[in-house]
Image (cartoon, rainbow, N blue to C red):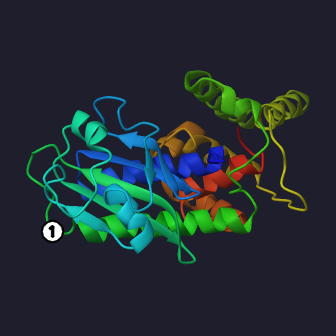
């Protein structure tokens, strides 16, 4: 049975796909996790339609299938005319008008855990540095997956979580409200009111959460404030403005939170914090 990625893994993948597009300058980027020899595409950036969403790529098949089993990036300047790959997915690839395509496996302890793709639609291809940039993004994603593995947060057969079933717009509103509630609590001078706001914030953070066994992570209120804002995609400058602190102070709080969560990036820290029920 094919397994679905956890919300933490999915968020890492979505961030990696966005970074892949930015770093390589490919017009289209997408990716998916591997399960039982099948990579299922669940994250896209720059797509025109839905043909690639939930595309299931089997090992040995297509460009991605070769990357999966060969454990190295695969590249073709003209996908449709290539004689070196199978053409099982021509309909889906053709629907996006893809010409040039690269597939980069994400390896954790020598095993393919995901595949990241970049494609062009006939425009000038990225310069010759794209492969180095692609490899860097894949390596960072591999490190973050491994951190979740070590913390037991990367199981791809989790118990059903109520948050995972919420529409994306509702989930984002919940997270935005949680971050705003933390900001209000921090600004409140009345202790009783602040304690009530903090208790309400913790209830929101724990909706649908099943805590990992024997694991306790303690963030300071300001570390949690900063992560809550980072989870909404705010920059360090925007976080500082929202919380009334300097950008350098934001960076300091992020650094200590990442250390406690054993996360190498802010995206990984947000994913880990959600996994521990510290933020929704």
Provide the secondary structure element on which disc 1 rests. Answer: loop
Question: Which residue is drawn at the image coordinates 62% and 56% (left, top)?
Answer: 269
Q: In which quarter of the image is the C terminus?
A: top right
Image height check: is 48 above or below 134? above
Q: Percent position (x, y) of residue 6?
A: 66, 47
Residue closest to the eye, 257 or 14: 14
Crowd band around label 1 with a 10 angstrom C-alpha radius: few (<14), some (14–19), many (20+): few
Question: Which residue is drawn at the image coordinates 13% and 53% (left, top)?
Answer: 81
Which residue position is annotated with label 1?
Answer: 128
Q: Percent position (x, y) of residue 142?
A: 52, 67
Lateral position of residue 124 relative to residue 236, left or right: left
Image height check: is 259 above or below 206? below
Question: Which residue is drawn at the image coordinates 56% and 46% (left, top)?
Answer: 11
Question: Which residue is drawn at the image coordinates 48% and 52% (left, top)?
Answer: 39
Image height check: is 169 above or below 216? above
Q: Percent position (x, y) of residue 246?
A: 52, 51
Q: Residue furthest bottom?
A: 110
Image height check: is 219 above or below 93? below
Lateral position of residue 20 relative to residue 213, left or right: left
Q: In which quarter of the image is residue 264?
A: bottom right
């Amino acid at each position: 049975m094919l397994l679905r990625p956890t919300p933490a893994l999915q968020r890492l993948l979505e961030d990696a796909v966005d970074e892949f597009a930015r770093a390589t300058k490919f017009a289209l980027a997408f990716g998916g996790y591997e399960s039982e020899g099948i990579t299922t595409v669940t994250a896209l950036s720059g797509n025109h339609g839905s043909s690639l969403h939930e595309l299931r790529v089997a090992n040995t098949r297509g460009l991605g299938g070769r990357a999966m089993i060969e454990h190295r990036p695969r590249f073709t300047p003209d996908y449709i005319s290539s004689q070196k790959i199978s053409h099982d997915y021509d309909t889906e690839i053709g629907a996006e008008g893809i010409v040039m395509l690269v597939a980069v496996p994400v390896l954790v302890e020598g095993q393919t855990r995901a595949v990241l793709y970049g494609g062009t639609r006939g425009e000038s291809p990225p310069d010759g540095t794209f492969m180095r940039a692609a490899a860097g993004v894949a390596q960072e994603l591999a490190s973050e997956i491994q951190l979740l593995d070590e913390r037991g947060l990367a199981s791809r057969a989790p118990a059903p979580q109520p948050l995972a079933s919420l529409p994306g717009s509702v989930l984002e509103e919940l997270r935005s409200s949680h971050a705003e509630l933390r900001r209000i609590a921090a600004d409140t001078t009345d202790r009783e009111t602040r304690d009530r706001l903090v208790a309400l914030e913790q209830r929101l953070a724990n909706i649908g959460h099943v805590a990992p066994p024997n694991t306790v992570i303690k963030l300071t209120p300001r570390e949690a404030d900063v992560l809550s804002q980072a989870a909404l995609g705010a920059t360090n400058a925007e976080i500082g403005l929202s919380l009334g602190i300097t950008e350098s102070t934001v960076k300091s709080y992020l650094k200590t939170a990442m250390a406690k969560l054993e996360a190498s990036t802010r995206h990984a820290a947000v994913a880990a914090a959600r996994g521990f029920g510290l933020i929704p």
